Amino acid sequence: MSAQQKLKGNYSSVDGIGVFFKNYSFDEDSVFIYEEGGDLGVIKYGKGHYIIKNDSLLLNYDLTQLKEESYFTAKKYYNSKDSIKVRLNIYNFDRKPLYNIQIYSQSNLKSTESDKNGNAILIFKKGEFKEIIEIHIDGDFFAKQIIYLHRNSNYIVDVFMSKSKIIGFGHPRAIKNEIIKYKIIENNKKCLKLKKENKIVTYKKL
């Protein structure tokens, strides 16, 4: 194969039970997109330039766009009550309220969900926690947010959730600033067969 050869189109490899996949998309401008995942969605992704040289395919992940993480801002106050209140306001990045987002404390399994206005409240007895309060905020196809709060403080927390391509986790893992080399075993109209170390993977052309 010459260095000028190009790949074009979409290629996919699926495991024997049809759950896990690896997909490549190549265009004539020497740009590729990679996605890997399963039934819960995409778990790994990347984008970059590719080169075919002799019998090798070099993938340079130099174009991968990174995802912004979910984040929060918090205000706290104190009083003499025997319990503390954590009030949460859940939004997307456009500051629109998010409904039915799951909120739970990892330590005592206390849980709730955000209402139609994106609001939720958790109440804890003072002294219920020895150190910090760990609160998880999670929703389908949103990057999970974990918050650590002081055990004797009341809080008002604004949480901003980032969209994701996978259920129940953070963002898919981004591959960036890495060059991966494969040996091309076969390349025709039906498939692309690649070898790395001692493993060979066949990608069917779609």
Image (spheres, grey):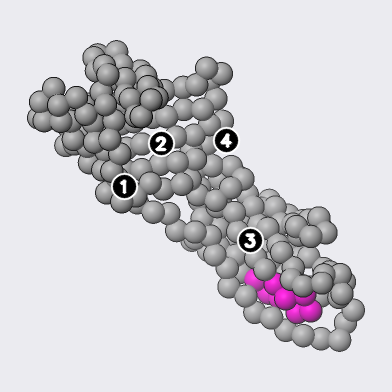
Q: Which mark is residue 40?
A: 4
Q: Earlier in the sequence, mark 3 or mark 1?
A: 3
Q: Secondary structure at mark 1?
A: loop
| Picture residue at 76% right of the left edge, 59% below the top | 105
Residue at point 87% right, 74% down?
127
Q: Secondary structure at mark 2?
A: strand
Question: 44 and 77: which one is in front?
Answer: 44
- Which residue is at the front of the view, 100 or 66? 66
Q: Nearer the viewer, mark 1 or mark 4?
A: 1
- Within 10 angstroms of label 2, few (less than 14), some, or many (20 or more) residues? many
Please give the name of the residue rendered at 45% of the width and 58% of the height, measured from the top-left corner.
68
- Write down the quadrant of residue 5 in the picture: top left
Query: Quadrant where the C terminus lies?
Result: top left
Q: Is residue 156 magenta?
A: yes
Q: Which residue is mark 1?
A: 178
Q: For the residues carrying marks 1 and 2, which lies nearer the camera in this image?
A: 1
Residue placed furthest toward the front: 198
- Say which residue label 2 marks: 35
- The residue range painted magenta reads 149-157
Q: Are marks 3 and 4 in contact (CB under 8 Å)?
A: no
For disc 3, the marked residue is: 146
- State whether residue 97 is above or below residue 200: below
CA–CA distance in space, label 4 to label 2: 13 Å
Please rate how many residues cluster around mark 1, counting C-alpha atoms within 10 Å: few if below 14, some from 14 to 19, many from 20. Answer: few
Image coordinates of residue 23 in percent, x first then y, are 38, 29
Tell me which amino acid carries mark 1.
Glu
Q: What distance separates the C-alpha of mark 3 from that of mark 1? A: 29 Å
Q: Quadrant of the N terminus?
A: top left
Measured Cα–Cα span from mark 2 to mark 3: 26 Å
